[in-house]
C-alpha cells in the first residue's frame, strides 16, 4: 500500500469520535505481549504470555476477521467506527496484524529462545542431535507418528481435501519420474492435534525439545515413495468461526441439532488467514490463494528460526519439570465480609449478613460449599442456576447430580451457545437431564450470560432463599486466574428479583419491574444512560458528581456519547477497561474529563463494577455485563445493586486500587494507543494483583472516590 493511502486511512480513523473495535482489540493484545517483555518476569512467564497472545489472535481471526469476511463475501455494507468501509478497513486491519505478527516472532527469536537456553531448555533441529538421539527420534516417528499421518493428494481426479482449522500442515509438491516438470501434484499431510507439540530428549543438565514438524519433515520422504519431491511447505490456516444461530421455534432436539450443524460449519468455514514458513512453494501458495480467494495481506510469513503456532508453547509452560520455576501464587485469603470462612455454617452465616467474594483473592470454596450442602440438606427444596462455562471436571455438575439424586427440584439453564464451549456444555447438559434435572438449552436469539444461583430452603415454618450473583462463570479452574465479583445473600429484595428473573428464563413471563436488578436486553442500556445523565445534571447544578466504571469492554456508541455529554457537563469520569475501548478519552471539547486505564497482569481482569456518586447517595452495581451492543441487545445479562455499607465500600476500594496501580496499568491516549504506567520519582510500586491479598479493613471502610 502506498504511503499516501496509509496516511489517508490514518487521517480518517483519527477524525472519528470513536475508536474501531477491532483496532482497539489489537492494542489490547499488544498489552498482553508487553507482559511477555517485562524484565521482572521469568522466561516461563514470558512464554506463557506469548502463548496467550497466539490464542487470542487465533480467536480474533476466527471471529472478528471471520465476521468481516461475512460482509466482504456477500457484498454487505459495513462502516466501521473508524469511518472506513469494508475493503479499506480490511487493508488497515491486515497491515496492523502483520506488524503485530512480526513483533511476536522477533520477541520469540531474540528473547524467548535465548532465555530458554539459559534455563537448560533448548529447541533443537534434528541435525544437531547425536546419532543415538537421531535413532531415538526415528523410532518414535515409525511407531507413534507414521501410522497417524495420511497424505492427501489433490489432482484432476481427486477433490480438494478438507484442511482442518489451526492444524500444522505440510504441503508437498511432487512429480512422477518421466513426466513433464509442469505436471505437478499437490499433497497435504496434516499433523493430528493429539500428537504432542514437542518430542523431549533429556541430556544430563538440559532438556531438548524437537518440534514435531521437524520430526515429520526429516522423515516425510517415507510417505512419498517413487516420486520426486519438488517442495515441502509448512503452513497453518485459520477458518471463519463466526456464525449466528438461525431462528428456531423448537428449543430441544431441533435446537441442539442446529448448534451441532453450526459447529461442523466452523470446521469447514472460509479460510481467513494462512501462516506459512519461509522457503514455501510459490506454485502451491498461489493455488491456495486462488482457491480460497485471499490476497497476500492475509499471508503471514514465518522465518525458519521461529515457529508456526505459539499456542504449542503450553506444553513447555505446563511441564511438571518447570513448575517450581514459575512464581508461586499467594494462597487465597478469607473474604473481608466472611473472615470465619471454613469454620462457620454458610447457611447460618448468610441469614445474618451478606458476603462479597473477590476472586481469585478469595477462592470459590464458599460457593462450592453452599451448593454441596444444598445438594445434601434434606430441607433444601430447589436449586436453580445459569451456567455459561464449566471446569473440565466440574464440582458444580457433581453437586447438581447429587441434588437430583436426592429428590430436589433442579433447574439449570445451560448456555449451549457459549463460544468454543458448545460441545462441552451440550454433553454436560445431557448428563443433568438424564439425572432428572430440568434443563433449558439457552434462549432463542439470546445468549444467557448472566451468572445466577438460587437455593430454596425450608426452615421450620419459614422459607429462606439463598442467592449468588456474580460477574464470572461457575468454573473452579478459571476462578484461580480471573478477577471476579460474587455476592452471596438472603436479601429478600434481591431474592425476589432473582426469582422473577428465573421465571423469565424458564417460563413465559414479563416482569413489570425489578428493584435492585438491572437486566438486559430490556432495561440495561437505558438505565445506565439515565444514571449517567443524572450525574451530568448534578454537575451542571454544581453538585458533587462522578462516574467510576470497570468493565472488560466498552463499545456501545449510545453509552459512549452519553459519557461524552457527561464529560462536557463537568462530570469526572474514570474508566477501567481491560480490552476493547471505543471511547476516545481526553479529546478537547469532547471528553476532557474522561480518563481510561487498562489493567493487564498476572490475573485476567473480568469483574464489572459500576459506581455513580449521585450527590453522595451512591449507586454501586456489579454483574455480568460489559458496555457492548451484544450485552445490551443480544444477551440475557444482569447487574445487581450492592447496598450493604461494607460490601459497597469493598467495590469502591476495588475501583480505587485499580486506579492507583502503577505496575499493571496502561493509560489510554486520545489516538487509541496506550502508555504503560510506572512509579514516578520516589513513588512505591502498587500492584493490585498483590495488594488485594493484604487488605486493611479500616482503610477499605474509609475509601472515597469523590471528595465532598
Image (cartoon, rainbow, N blue to C red):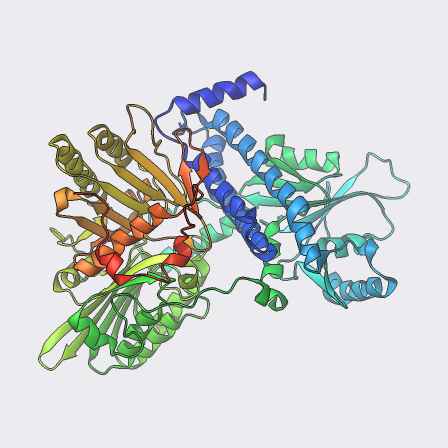
562 vs 683, left or right, is: left
Residue 560, horizontal then vertical, whole percent: 29, 34
Is 554 situated above or below 315?
A: above
Give the residue displayed 29% in from the left and 61% down from the top.
Answer: 696
Residue at (32% x, 69% y) in the render? 334
Q: Position of residue 660 (x, y in %)?
A: 35, 47
Dividing the picture into quadrants, the one containing residue 326 is bottom right
Q: Nearer the viewer, residue 78 or 343?
A: 343
Of residues 351 and 625, the one nearer the viewer is: 351
- Left or right of residue 644: residue 18: right
Q: Residue furthest left?
A: 461
Image x and y of residue 460, in percent: 11, 82
Residue 188 horizontal side relative to residue 385, left or right: right
Residue 553 x/y as whole percent: 36, 43
Residue 208 falls in which quadrant of the image? bottom right
Quick check: 101 left or right of 401? right
What residue sits 49% from the left and 35% below the top?
A: 69
Judge whether 103 appears above or below 589 on screen. Answer: below
Q: Is residue 623 visible?
A: no
> Which quadrant, please, contains the C terminus?
top left
Amino acid at each position: 500500500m502506498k504511503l499516501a493511502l496509509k496516511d489517508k486511512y490514518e487521517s480518517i480513523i483519527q477524525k472519528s469520535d470513536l475508536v474501531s473495535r477491532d483496532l482497539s482489540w489489537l492494542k489490547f493484545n499488544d498489552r498482553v505481549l508487553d507482559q511477555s517483555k517485562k524484565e521482572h518476569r521469568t522466561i516461563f512467564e514470558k512464554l506463557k504470555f506469548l502463548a496467550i497472545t497466539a490464542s487470542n489472535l487465533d480467536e480474533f481471526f476466527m471471529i472478528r476477521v471471520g465476521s468481516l469476511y461475512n460482509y466482504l463475501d456477500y457484498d454487505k455494507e459495513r462502516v466501521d467506527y473508524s469511518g472506513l468501509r469494508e475493503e479499506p478497513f480490511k487493508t488497515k486491519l491486515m497491515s496492523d496484524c502483520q506488524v503485530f505478527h512480526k513483533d511476536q516472532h522477533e520477541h520469540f527469536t531474540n528473547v524467548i529462545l535465548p532465555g530458554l537456553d539459559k534455563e537448560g531448555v533448548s529447541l533443537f533441529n534434528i541435525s544437531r542431535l547425536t546419532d543415538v538421539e537421531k535413532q531415538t527420534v526415528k523410532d518414535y516417528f515409525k511407531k507413534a507418528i507414521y501410522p497417524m499421518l495420511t497424505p492427501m493428494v489433490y489432482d484432476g481426479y481427486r477433490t480438494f481435501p478438507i484442511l482442518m482449522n489451526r492444524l500444522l500442515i505440510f504441503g508437498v509438491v511432487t512429480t512422477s519420474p518421466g513426466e513433464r516438470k509442469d505436471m505437478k501434484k499437490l499433497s497435504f499431510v496434516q499433523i493430528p492435534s493429539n500428537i504432542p507439540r514437542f518430542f523431549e530428549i533429556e541430556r544430563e543438565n538440559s532438556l531438548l525439545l524437537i518440534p514435531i514438524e521437524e520430526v515429520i519433515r526429516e522423515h516425510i520422504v517415507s510417505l512419498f515413495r517413487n516420486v520426486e519431491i519438488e517442495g515441502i511447505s509448512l503452513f497453518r490456516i485459520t477458518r471463519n468461526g463466526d456464525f449466528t444461530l438461525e431462528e428456531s421455534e423448537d428449543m430441544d432436539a431441533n435446537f441442539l441439532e442446529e448448534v451441532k450443524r453450526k459447529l461442523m460449519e466452523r470446521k469447514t468455514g472460509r479460510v481467513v488467514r494462512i501462516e506459512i514458513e519461509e522457503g514455501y512453494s510459490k506454485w502451491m501458495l498461489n493455488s491456495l490463494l486462488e482457491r480460497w480467494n485471499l490476497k497476500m495481506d492475509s499471508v503471514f510469513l514465518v522465518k525458519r528460526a521461529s515457529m508456526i503456532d505459539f499456542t504449542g508453547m503450553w506444553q513447555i509452560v505446563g511441564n511438571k519439570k518447570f513448575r517450581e520455576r514459575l512464581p508461586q501464587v499467594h494462597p487465597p485469603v478469607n473474604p473481608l465480609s466472611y473472615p470465619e470462612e471454613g469454620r462457620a455454617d454458610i447457611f447460618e452465616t448468610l441469614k445474618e449478613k451478606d458476603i462479597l467474594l473477590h476472586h481469585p483473592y478469595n477462592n470459590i470454596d464458599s460457593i462450592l460449599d453452599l451448593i454441596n450442602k444444598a445438594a445434601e440438606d434434606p430441607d433444601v427444596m430447589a436449586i436453580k442456576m445459569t451456567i455459561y462455562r464449566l471446569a473440565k471436571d466440574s464440582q458444580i455438575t457433581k453437586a447438581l447430580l447429587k441434588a437430583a439424586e436426592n429428590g430436589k427440584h433442579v433447574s439449570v439453564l445451560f448456555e449451549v451457545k457459549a463460544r468454543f464451549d458448545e460441545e462441552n456444555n451440550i454433553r454436560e447438559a445431557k448428563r443433568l437431564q438424564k439425572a432428572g434435572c430440568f434443563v433449558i438449552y439457552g434462549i432463542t436469539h439470546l445468549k444467557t450470560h448472566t451468572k445466577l444461583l438460587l437455593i430454596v430452603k425450608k426452615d421450620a415454618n419459614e422459607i429462606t432463599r439463598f442467592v449468588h450473583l456474580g460477574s464470572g462463570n461457575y468454573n473452579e479452574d478459571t476462578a484461580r486466574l480471573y478477577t471476579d465479583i460474587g455476592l452471596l445473600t438472603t436479601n429478600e429484595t434481591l431474592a425476589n428479583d432473582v426469582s422473577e428473573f428465573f421465571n423469565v428464563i424458564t417460563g413465559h413471563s414479563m416482569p413489570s419491574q425489578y428493584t435492585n436488578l438491572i437486566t438486559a436486553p430490556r432495561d440495561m442500556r437505558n438505565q445506565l444512560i439515565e444514571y449517567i445523565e443524572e450525574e451530568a445534571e448534578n454537575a451542571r447544578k454544581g453538585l458533587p458528581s462522578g462516574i467510576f466504571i470497570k468493565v472488560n469492554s466498552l463499545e456501545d456508541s449510545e453509552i459512549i456519547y452519553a459519557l461524552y455529554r457527561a464529560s462536557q457537563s463537568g462530570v469526572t469520569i474514570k474508566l477501567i477497561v481491560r480490552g476493547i475501548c471505543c471511547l476516545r478519552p481526553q479529546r478537547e471539547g469532547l471528553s476532557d474529563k474522561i480518563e481510561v486505564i487498562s489493567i493487564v497482569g498476572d490475573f485476567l481482569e473480568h469483574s464489572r463494577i459500576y459506581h455513580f456518586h449521585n450527590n453522595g447517595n451512591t449507586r454501586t452495581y456489579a454483574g455480568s455485563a460489559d458496555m457492548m451492543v451484544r450485552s445490551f441487545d443480544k444477551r440475557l445479562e444482569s447487574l445487581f445493586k450492592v447496598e450493604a455499607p461494607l460490601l459497597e465500600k469493598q467495590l469502591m476500594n476495588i475501583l480505587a486500587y485499580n486506579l492507583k496501580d502503577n505496575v499493571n496499568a496502561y493509560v489510554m491516549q486520545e489516538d487509541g494507543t496506550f502508555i504503560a504506567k510506572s512509579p514516578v520519582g520516589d513513588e512505591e510500586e502498587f500492584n493490585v494483583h498483590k495488594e488485594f491479598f493484604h487488605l486493611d479493613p479500616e482503610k477499605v471502610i474509609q475509601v472515597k472516590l469523590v471528595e465532598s
